[in-house]
Amino acid sequence: MSADPAHSLSSQRLRGPRTSTVEVRRSARRRSTVSAYREGDRTVVLIPARMSATEEQRWVTVMLDKLAAQESRQMLGDDELAARAAQLSAQYLGGRAAPDIVRWVTNQNSRWGSCTPSEGSIRLSHRLQGMPEYVIDYVLLHELAHLLVPGHGPRFWKLLDSYPRTERARGYLEGVVAAGRLPHLPAARQE
Ligand SMILES: [Zn+2]
């Protein structure tokens, strides 16, 4: 496949969560590396000129996934966290849990989250940052539910019944804890 300058730039529209335009740029100088970055509301994917259409499709998908993963690892700020809490309370608790303070803390290493009903505050451990959204949502919802019901009795779990990913999130967190206890194998440390 030769690089025809007239066709060195193709573009396609993909509807993803970000609803952005994907622009594929072919470069004759690029031999084997593929890279991608966001430019305003569009995503630019740089590929070698000789790459086939099939390979192009595959790499665009790979790079979009990679960018999305990087972005989801970026941390929500305290304001976004408070907005998220309000949304979860409205969606799953009828809006009855209305905390005054929701924020990240770095001094909480033995718990994922905590709640102080007397001051209407919720704190989440910074160790949750970078975990999947449904896990952060679960911990947030769990602490919101504690504003309504202390302890972990049947009334408490009933509040979390309608959140569809409770079991999955609990499994994920248990896995993280278990992995922390495993010895590190030398191979696992290599990049
Ligand atoms: Zn709890």
Image (spheres, rainbow, N blue to C red):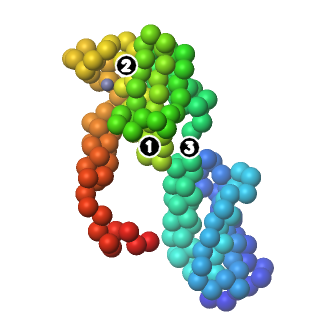
SS of the residue at dot 3? loop
In the rendered image, is residue 134 in sight?
no
Instruction: Please say if the residues under marks 2 and 1 sit with CB atoms less than 8 Å apart.
Output: no
Q: In this view, does 34 lie to the left or right of 58?
A: right
In the rendering, which numbered label is found on residue 44? none
Asked whether mark 2 lies closer than 8 Å to ligand 1, one says yes
Q: Does 20 appear above or below 31?
A: above
Question: How would you rate the neighbour count of disc 1 (Cα within 10 Å): few for under 14, some for 14-19, many for 20 or more?
Answer: some
- Residue matched to label 1: 127
Measuring 33% from the left and 73% from the top, which residue is drawn there?
187
SS of the residue at dot 1? helix
Residue 82 locus on image (x, y percent):
55, 26
Residue 17 locus on image (x, y percent):
56, 46
Q: Does 159 appear above or below 73?
A: above
Q: What residue type is labelled 3?
A: Met
In the rendered image, is residue 167 in sight?
yes
- Residue matched to label 3: 75
Q: What residue type is labelled 1?
A: Arg
In the rendering, which numbered label is found on residue 145? 2
Residue 71 locus on image (x, y percent):
57, 51
Q: What residue type is labelled 2?
A: Ala
Measuring 49% from the left and 19% from the top, which residue is drawn there?
121
Q: How far apart are marks 1 and 3 (CA)?
A: 11 Å
Nearer to us in this view, 4 or 46: 46
Measuring 32% from the left and 18% from the top, which residue is drawn there?
159
Q: Is residue 158 left or right of residue 42?
A: left
